[in-house]
Image (spheres, rainbow, N blue to C red):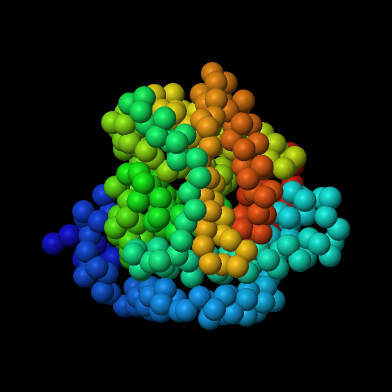
Amino acid sequence: MREASIKPIRRKNQKNSQVTERYRFRDFLAPVFWPTWLAIAGLYLMAWLPLRLRLLVSRCLAGLLYRLVASRRKIAHTNIRLCFPELDAQAQRRLVGEVFYSNILNYFETALAWCRPNHSMPLELNGLEHLHRAQSTGRGVVLLSGHFGPIDIVGSKIVDHVDLTFVYRKDDNPLFNYFTTRARERYCTATLAHKDIKGILRALKGGATVWYAPDQDYGREASVFVPFFGVPTATITMTSKLAKAGNAVVVPISGYRRADGRGFVASIEAPLDIPSGDEVVDARTVNAWLERRIAEHPEQYLWLHKRFKTRPEGEPSVYN
């Protein structure tokens, strides 16, 4: 009997990537997981809503949550104020409102990717030749992305053109982590936990294309402080390390939702000069690229995350 059947606890900092090999849904039948089962059922319902209803429900929920979830509203306002000081207070408030709407809508779109892998939402893919050129070298590819809104749904469509290994941050809830991993593996070649560095390097050395998004706050230990929208920001140096140790090409990809909500656009660009031999320079390169792409559709970025939580020594928290 598997350990999960005996002790279905919530585990943090899981490094093992073999989630779908070790567990099955029947391992998560204990009452502690019943609320998660309801949430998963809700995702399946969301995935089958017609587009117009999806947009309407997202707009209504965004307005409601903007008023009710004060903590996330404060985080988003702080992030927008720091990154877009050129906007007046009214414009910043409007942008935060659109951030809430876009993030709620993204839950519906992610439900499509996870629960309806053969969904019909169209994707316009530009720059595929850059990826093919990098792959033709025989080296692995770090497909560098960020937490743009439609990450999963773009990923579920891009696999029509390329085999993709997806690196993700594991959820602390073992059932939800198993559900999302299993869902992603329906359209990806493989999934790897972001702490599974050996697994990621093994994939890159084998010539795999690995989707990797380093734009979250992972603390001080693995980071350097470089500007992000003019703010000194803890930025991990793992992109450089993976490219160097895995002998990989770093190819950036970004994506956004069309204004009418009826499809998505993804753009692959020429490789970045990473590794340059200087991890601080590489971190600046990553952030500068992210800034350019986020600025094109700022409302679709994950501003609800405490991107500036880790501060340089002696600086107070920006979220107080």
Q: Residue at x 86, y 58 (%)?
A: 88
Residue 197, placed above or below residue 167: above
Rendering coords of residue 139 (x, y %): 35, 27
> In which quarter of the view is residue 273 placed?
top right
| Residue 118, percent from left and from top | 34, 64
**Is 207 situated left or right of 158 in this image?**
left
Q: Residue furthest right?
A: 88
> In the rendered image, which quarter is residue 29 located in?
bottom left
Q: Residue at (53%, 32%) from the top-left corner?
A: 270
Spot occupied by residue 250 in the image (x, y as percentages of width and height): 48, 32
Instruction: Residue at the far left: name it.
Output: 1
Of 150 and 173, the residue lying toward us? 150
Query: Is residue 227 depicted above or below 179 in this figure?
Result: above
Residue in the image at 42% along x and 73% along y: 47
User: Horizontal placement of 240 versus 63: left or right?
Assistant: left
Q: In screen coordinates, is 268 left or right of 12?
A: right
Viewer-closest of 80 and 273 = 273
The answer to which quarter of the image holds residue 119 is bottom left
Which residue is depicted at the point 69% across and 48% down?
Answer: 295
Residue 249 or residue 270, whichever sits in front: 270
Q: Is residue 259 visible?
A: yes
What is the total number of numbered labels drawn onto the structure image? 0
Residue 259: where, in percent of width, then height? 62, 64
What quarter of the picture does the C terminus occupy? bottom right
Q: In the rendered image, is residue 201 in sight? A: no
Looking at the figure, which quarter contains the N terminus?
A: bottom left
